[in-house]
Image (cartoon, rainbow, N blue to C red):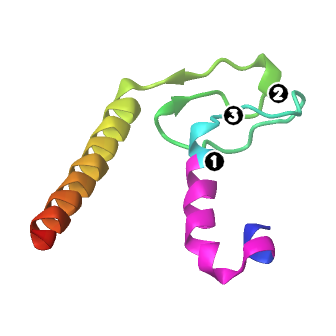
Amino acid sequence: MSVEFFGMDVGHYAAISIIIAFLMTGHRSVFPSQVLSMKKSEVINIKLGEELENTETTYSTRFFINMQRIIKLIITKSRKKVQNNDEDIK
C-alpha cells in the first residue's frame, strides 16, 4: 500500500518495515479465534493448532540479545560515517 501511495522509491523501506513488524508482533491479532498454523520464529515457543486466545507465548532471550547486537552495529556504523564526514569537511 505504501508503494501505491508514495511510489517505488519507498519500496525497500516498506519491505523492511513489514518484516520487522511481522516478527515483532509475535502472535498477537485482532482476531482471538484465529487458529495458529505456523510459527513466525523458532525462538517463539507456542503450541500450533490452538486458538490464539488459549496460547501462552514465551520468548527466548537469544532473540533480544541478537537484536541488541544488530542495533549496536547500526549505531556504530552510523557514528563512523558521521566522523568520516566531519574529517572530510575539515
Corner quadrant of residue 23: top right
Residue where numbered disc 3 is placed: 27
Q: Residues within 10 Å of mark 2 (few under 14, many from 20)?
A: some
First reached walking from the N terminus: tag 3 or tag 2 = 3
Instruction: Report how far apart the C-alphas of labels 3 and 2 lie in the structure.
Output: 11 Å
For the point 62% across and 73% down, the residue is 10
Q: What x and y, as percent, mark residue 53? A: 81, 21
Q: What x and y, as percent, mark residue 84? A: 14, 65
Mark 2, secondary structure of its residue: loop
Between circles 3 and 1, the one closer to the viewer is 1
Relative side of 60 to 34, left or right:
left
State the quadrant of the C terminus: bottom left
Relative side of 83 to 8, left or right:
left
Mark 3, secondary structure of its residue: loop
Q: Tags 3 and 2 in contact by the CB under 8 Å rule?
A: no
| Amino acid type at mark 2 | Glu
Q: Nearer the viewer, residue 48 or 4?
A: 4
Residue where numbered disc 2 is placed: 51
| Amino acid type at mark 3 | His
Magenta-colored segment: predominant secondary structure: helix
Q: Which mark is residue 72?
A: none
Q: Nearer the viewer, residue 55 or 8?
A: 8
For the record, the magenta segment spans 5-20
Relative side of 41 to 63, left or right:
right
Q: How many marks?
A: 3
Mark 1, secondary structure of its residue: helix
| Amino acid type at mark 1 | Phe
View extreme (bottom): residue? 8
Residue where numbered disc 1 is placed: 22
